[in-house]
């Protein structure tokens, strides 16, 4: 944060970005974006503007005490960051976005028997998956239509469509939908298509880009120029909306952590005998019970201790049972620490409410660790649950202790989601082998045994596949490499697991 009096043009980058103006008390009064931060801020601090501009702008200029700058990679990214910061700070001079216009999101309800993507503008705490936001509404609408058709997903509105809905639907007739409502595709196969669509939305677009380029080139070679132009437009929208450069979209400013202040305050608020210098937090992640994983992150002195982070694959729980999953990973974690005589944490945090907390506590009591301080943090109202029961503890929203708990909980969630997505991607890639004629379960197992994953297989050529896998000839090997995309890819680098 720079005082206005320290403003110098040469100190400001000539790049896209977002700027915040604060008054002399530090309150954010305006958020703006610019293709060139240097040119935009220069325009504000010209002496003549404070005398000649309209009253609103003059009032803003005279109120500026400090400014902050955040550089981004593109104008699209600055638009998203500007919108997020306006909604976060609600600055009084930002009247242009006061209508609360929100960018489009893609929403996916995975609890539905046959999930479908819908557009939304508000991210709710309703258990659904949200992707975005997307600043170019026309592009995301076109891409939703294309992806829905490409993967044969349904567009009908009933929660669980059936025969009666099918009678009034033309999507199957014109081959837009796989018609799960009348059993033309199994629930498992439909779910696989949903996973493949999610992979594209999350930025893994290489295979689809290659497919679209091939169709565009074939149409152009056949002099079908309108069709080629249509594939070109879809390709451009795909790369603009879901391409690798847009994963995650906005890079928010680097997060600062409460540190020692949060640790000391948390000790007081929870009535702990010792300062919680070492805190471990657990979170679960799964997709309808599949690829179920958990994470444990560790903070030391109020800061992330990333070398202590751990991933867990769920081993003993089938289906969706968040309580049982939490009990399993807590028991496995502290069984190991006890066996290896490692230091125990000063506080255990469970991402969840009373149910998850008590499931974890039962595991601690089985290990004779009932003395270990443990709490649950429920996200919706940021309520803190304790083993003692009673009303949950609600800390002031801006206190350092709550910020510390939120930081470690959010980090556990991020770490779990990252691992879960990596496993899901690997499963989707490996499933490509199922689509190749002549590759049965036995050959698939042998290929994965030799190469580890389809991602690793892509780093080799067909000759290596023939050499290492008995029974696969040159022609089939070439067919396999063409189907999976071939070429090089970064190796799998799994995080540490317990």
Image (cartoon, rainbow, N blue to C red):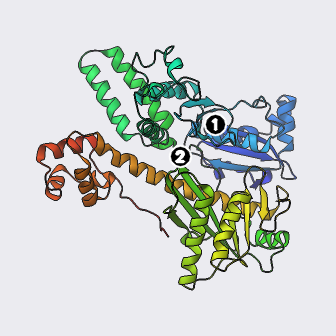
Residue at (78% x, 62% y) in the render? 385
Q: Is residue 463 left or right of residue 320?
A: left
Q: Identify the image quadrant of residue 232.
A: top left
Q: Which residue is mark 2?
A: 288
Residue at (41% x, 39% y) in the render? 205
Q: Residues within 10 Å of mark 1 (few under 14, many from 20)?
A: some
Q: Is residue 246 above or below residue 422?
A: above
Residue 382 x, y percent position in the rendering: 77, 54
The residues tagged by marks 1 and 2 sit, at their Cα atoms, a distance apart of 34 Å
The mark tally for this picture is: 2
Q: Nearer the viewer, residue 397 or 3?
A: 397
Dot 1: element: helix
Q: Nearer the viewer, residue 345 or 456?
A: 345
Q: Is residue 42 above or below residue 310?
A: above
Residue at (32% x, 25% y) in the render? 216
Q: Is residue 32 above or below residue 66?
A: above
Q: Earlier in the sequence, mark 1 or mark 2?
A: 1
Would you say residue 303 is visible in this rendering?
no
Residue 165 x, y percent position in the rendering: 53, 19
Q: Which mark is residue 79?
A: 1
Q: Residues within 10 Å of mark 2 (few under 14, many from 20)?
A: few
Q: Is residue 65 left or right of residue 141?
A: right
Would you say residue 182 is visible in this rendering?
yes
Q: Identify the image quadrant of residue 321.
A: bottom right
Q: Residue furthest bottom?
A: 341
Residue 340 x, y percent position in the rendering: 53, 84
């Amino acid at each position: 944060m720079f005082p206005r009096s320290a403003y110098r043009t040469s100190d400001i980058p000539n790049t896209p970005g977002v700027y915040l103006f604060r008054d002399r008390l530090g309150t954010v009064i305006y958020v703006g974006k610019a293709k060139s931060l240097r040119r935009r801020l220069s325009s504000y601090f010209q002496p003549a503007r404070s005398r000649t501009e309209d009253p609103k702008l003059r009032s803003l200029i005279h109120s500026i005490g400090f400014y902050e700058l955040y550089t981004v990679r593109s104008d699209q990214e600055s638009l998203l960051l500007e919108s997020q910061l306006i909604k976060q700070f609600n600055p009084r001079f930002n009247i242009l976005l006061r209508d609360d216009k929100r960018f489009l999101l893609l929403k996916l309800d995975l609890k539905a028997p046959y999930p479908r993507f819908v557009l939304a503008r508000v991210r709710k705490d309703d258990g659904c998956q949200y992707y975005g936001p997307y600043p170019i509404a026309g592009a995301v609408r076109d891409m939703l239509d294309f992806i829905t058709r490409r993967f044969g997903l349904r567009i009908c509105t009933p929660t669980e469509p059936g025969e009666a809905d099918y009678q009034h639907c033309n999507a199957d007739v014109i081959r837009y939908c796989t018609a799960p409502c009348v059993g033309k595709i199994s629930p498992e196969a439909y779910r696989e298509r949903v996973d493949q669509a999610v992979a594209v939305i999350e930025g893994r677009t290489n295979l689809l880009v290659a497919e679209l380029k091939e169709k565009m080139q074939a149409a152009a070679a056949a002099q079908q120029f309108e069709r080629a132009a249509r594939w070109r437009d879809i390709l451009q929208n795909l790369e603009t909306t879901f391409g690798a450069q847009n994963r995650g979209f906005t890079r928010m400013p680097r997060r600062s952590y409460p540190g020692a202040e949060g640790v000391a305050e948390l000790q007081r608020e929870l009535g702990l005998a010792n300062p919680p210098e070492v805190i471990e937090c657990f979170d679960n992640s799964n997709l309808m019970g599949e690829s179920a994983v958990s994470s444990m992150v560790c903070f030391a002195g109020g800061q992330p201790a990333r070398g202590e982070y751990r991933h867990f694959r769920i081993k003993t729980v089938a289906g969706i049972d968040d309580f049982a999953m939490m009990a399993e990973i807590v028991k496995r974690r502290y069984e190991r620490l006890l066996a290896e005589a490692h230091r125990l944490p000063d506080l255990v945090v469970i991402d969840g409410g009373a149910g998850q907390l008590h499931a974890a506590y039962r595991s601690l009591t089985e290990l004779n660790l009932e003395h270990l301080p443990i709490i649950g943090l429920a996200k919706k109202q940021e309520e803190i649950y304790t083993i003692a029961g009673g009303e949950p503890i609600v800390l002031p929203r801006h206190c350092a202790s709550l910020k510390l708990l939120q930081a470690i909980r959010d980090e556990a969630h991020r770490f779990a989601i990252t691992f879960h997505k990596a496993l899901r991607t690997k499963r989707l890639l490996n499933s490509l082998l199922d689509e190749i004629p002549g590759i049965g379960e036995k050959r698939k197992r042998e290929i994965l045994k030799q190469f580890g994953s389809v991602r690793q297989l892509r780093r080799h050529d067909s000759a290596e596949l023939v050499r290492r896998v008995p029974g696969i000839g040159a022609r089939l090997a070439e067919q396999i490499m063409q189907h999976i995309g071939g070429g090089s890819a970064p190796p799998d680098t799994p995080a540490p697991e317990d």
